[in-house]
Image (cartoon, rainbow, N blue to C red):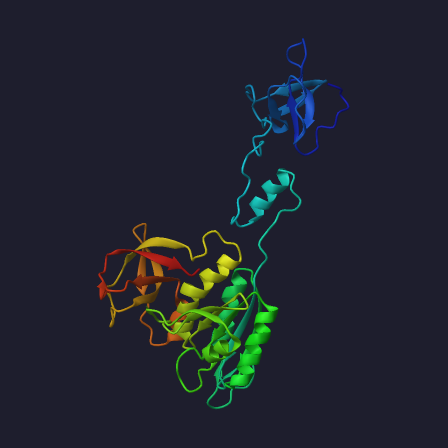
Amino acid sequence: MPDNWDHKGFGVHYCHPTSNDEGTAIRILTGAKIPEGADAVVAREFTTQDKGHVIVMNHTSPCRNIMTKGCDVALNDLVCAKGDRLAPGMVGILAAAGYSEIPVFRRPGVAILATGDEIIIPGRPLPDGKLYASNLAMLNAWCRRYGMNTSMDIVGDKPEVILNKLESAVEAHDAVLTSGGAWTGDRDFVVKMLETLGWKQLFHRIRIGPGKAVGFGLLKQKPVFVLPGGPSSNLLAFLQIALPGLLKLGGYRSPELPRMQVKLEKTVTVRDSDWTQFILGVFNEEDGHTSFEPLELKSRLQSMARAKGVIAVPEGAKEISAGSIVSAQLLV
């Protein structure tokens, strides 16, 4: 090996090339093709140079520090499948396989419409008898968390205004979420206006609590989720019905919140066993195990803000005893 070689570069290694003489070596950079006949590589930090000789200070063996051809991506290997999320590592191996472009699902565009004369945009002065549109902000945050493109609007309790907003929202977006006006009150116009527009209602009101007023249908072949206006009902209807639908629209193979098994710290009892009841709570670590503590705060908004998970008391059951192992959905 010539004396004038620069051995200070990053990733310099030595390997044994094809030769009739034992003990020869050649300099090679990280990532370079292995010279023909070489069968091992020694990292530069385990070598020194002395008068044209390379002194190796570590043992080696055949194939040491050599990546075989095709070990990352070989012919007919499955690199990724439909429904896989393109995390940075996945993008890297796709590039290693030579792909510069692949077909993907487009991020859904979601219109979020909050109805009610009583709600106003956060940040503005709050007149007497008005409420800030917390549902609107929360739904937008959930959708943006999953990379969806969103628009938000507040719509007053006027049938013709709601009708026009619904029509324009469907035209410009892939899906629509409505918040409020989902029940049967004098000012609950959302479903009526959807019927006027000719939507195909698939269901309205189901046996879950909170959130039983939730509805779903198609308008111009686009999904419309009708969510109740009460904060806890709004959140649980979104998490259990709307979010899985939106994730499915976005190409997710498993369009649901992640889950884990937890130990219930306290017995939970429900008043009505005619529907599935959802319970918000937090997780605690105890003796190497994760437990679930139901939240019992008076404020629904505070419970929603603190909650880290959700469990369900299934339809037909009145309670789940403390110490039971249950499946919890993760909100964080």
Q: Give the camera-side residue of 165 and 117.
A: 165
> Please, which residue is most extreme toward the right here?
4
- For the point 40% across and 64% down, which residue is it? 240
Query: Is residue 257 shown left or right of residue 90?
Result: left
Q: Position of residue 80 (x, y in %)?
A: 54, 43
In this rendering, the answer to whether 216 lies above or below 100 is below
Q: How many marks?
A: 0
In the rendered view of the protein, which quadrant contains the N terminus? top right
Residue 228, by quadrant, is bottom left
Q: Give the camera-side residue of 250 and 302.
A: 250
In the rendered view of the protein, which quadrant contains the C terminus? bottom left
Q: Position of residue 158 (x, y in %)?
A: 52, 86
Q: Give the camera-side residue of 34 and 43.
A: 34
In this rendering, the answer to whether 19 lies above or below 239 is above
- For the point 23% across and 60% down, which residue is it? 322
In this rendering, the answer to whether 255 lies above or below 127 is above
Q: Position of residue 261 (x, y in %)?
A: 33, 53
Q: Position of residue 308 (x, y in %)?
A: 40, 62
Query: Is residue 263 shown left or right of residue 114?
Result: left
- For the point 43% across and 57% down, which residue is it? 256
- For the point 47% across and 61% down, which residue is it? 245
Q: Is residue 305 visible?
A: no
> Please, which residue is most extreme toward the top here?
20
Query: Is residue 48 shown left or right of residue 158?
Result: right
Q: Give the camera-side residue of 244 and 11.
A: 244
Q: Is residue 208 visible?
A: yes
In this rendering, the answer to whether 128 lies above or below 314 is below
